[in-house]
Amino acid sequence: MACLALGAACLQAARADSVSVAVAANFAAPMQKIVAAFEADTGHKVTVSLGASGKFYAQITHGAPFQVLLSADEATPARLEREGKVVANSRFTYATGALVLWSAQPGLVDDQGAVLRHGRFRHIALANPKVAPYGAAALQVMETMGVATALQPRWVLGENIAQTFQFVASGNAQLGFVALSQVMEGGRMAQGSAWRVPTSLHAPIRQDAALLLAGRDNAAAIALLRYLRSEKARKIMHDHGYDT
């Protein structure tokens, strides 16, 4: 009788499912809000694991039970698709990221990135370029500017972009390359100083999502990928500095 009274709510609960999602660390903040909205709107439950895209590739190829991948690049999902670990035609770009050189110290980073050539600092943080797309973009920026070799002795490598951000936020590195989404919310930059790196200095950071084979019959997995294209999700992404 209670379910008859509640109608659609009980029907939603009966159909509710859960999904395990591997999410690139740079997307942590918007993903938290998207998950909250998605769960409220659909009744599905989402378990999020954060990390570097390269690490997720290794885990998925060794049988990790993720059902959806939200990568920080397009290469990793494409590679998994070629290897038969992604549902055919499920891959799409859910966001395009932006790279910033950021310091928790006001005034340290100028708006042209000249600090990379002339600044006095002991350490500069970046995500490991071998496994983290934002780290690869940071390396490409330094190479394009001709400062990579000179700065390499001062690098502090994060396992992923989240750890890289913590290095800078804590002051263990005076500045570092992080995702714009980590220092922006609601269209405003966080405290400190930053240079938004021009996209001409690195390849586009297209972030692709994919339905993994383990999620092909999972209603929550399919619904979540659909939800990422919704206006509500897109607004959250824009507020955190992503293009969609």
Image (tube, rainbow, N blue to C red):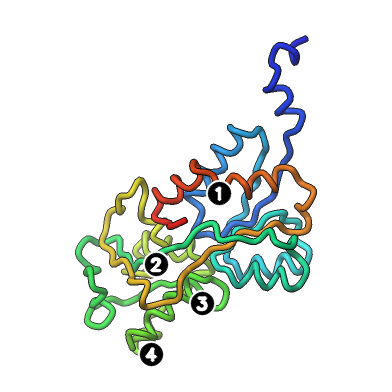
Q: Residue at x 41, y 51 (%)?
A: 238
Q: Residue 88: where, in percent of width, then height? A: 74, 62
What numbered label is drawn on residue 229?
1
Alpha carbon distance from label 3 to label 1: 29 Å
Mark 2 or mark 3: whose residue is earlier in sequence = 2
Label 4–label 2 contact, CB within 8 A: no
Viewer-side label of 4, 1: 1
The circle drawn on residue 99 is 2
Circle nearer the N terminus (1, 2): 2
User: Disc 4 or disc 2, which is closer to the eye?
Assistant: 2
Q: Is residue 105 left or right of residue 153?
A: left
Q: Amino acid at mark 4?
A: Thr
Q: Residue furthest front?
A: 89
Type of amino acid at the residue the image marks with label 3: Pro
Q: Which of label 2 and label 3 is nearer to you?
A: 2
Q: Is residue 163 above or below residue 9?
A: below
Q: Badges 3 and 1: C-beta atoms under 8 Å apart? A: no
